[in-house]
Image (cartoon, rainbow, N blue to C red):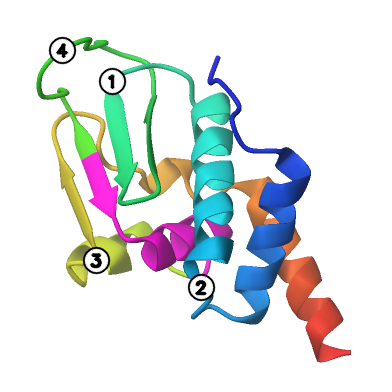
Amino acid sequence: MATRRTDPEAGRAALASWAAAPEAPRSVLAPAVRHTLELFAEEHPGGAVELRVPPFAAVQAIPGTRHTRGTPPAVVETDAGTWLALVTGDLTWADAVNGGRVRASGERSDLTELLPLIGPRRTVRAARDQESR
């Protein structure tokens, strides 16, 4: 089970703020990214893939070979905006990879079937619906 470091309510609030203004400052991006990475690790526990969104956070997820030292067997790395777009369904995995916005290597590093995440997707939809009213 992933260790929660981000208050879930603060994470959802940051994600809603990002939904309204995707060019959000670091003070919004950091908790939104950490929250969604923690959710991903909770929904897909394991240690086969390391997901990195520098400079904000990294988590290990997805069942399979677990590493404890050195280079992990699989790595997915992207920027904050791309990660949030992926977990909320604003961007598909294929488009992100083909556009060079994600670097993925190793076995199990294709996250096509694991994204978007339902909770963050709902949070963003609700925030955007509220914004449009």
Q: Amino acid at mark 2?
A: Pro
Q: Amino acid at mark 1?
A: Ala
Specify the quadrant of the image occupied by residue 38.
top right
Q: On the rendered structure, is 126 left or right of 35?
A: right
Mark 3 and mark 1: span between their CA atoms?
21 Å
Helix, strand or loop under label 3: loop
Helix, strand or loop under label 1: loop
Labels 4 and 1 touching (C-beta < 8 A): no
Labels 4 and 3 touching (C-beta < 8 A): no
Q: Which residue is mark 1?
A: 48
Mark 4 and mark 1: span between their CA atoms?
13 Å
Question: Can you say whether 55 is above or below 81 in the image?
Answer: above
Q: Which residues are magenta?
A: 76-90
Dot 1: within a 10 Å radius of its alpha carbon, few (fewer than 14), some, or many (20 or more) residues? many
Q: Earlier in the sequence, mark 4 or mark 2?
A: 2
Q: Which one is nearer the viewer's eye here, 72 or 43?
A: 72
Question: Can you say whether 125 is above or below 83 in the image?
Answer: below
Q: Which residue is mark 3?
A: 101
Q: Nearer the viewer, mark 4 or mark 1?
A: 4
- Residue 129: image x %, image y %? 81, 79
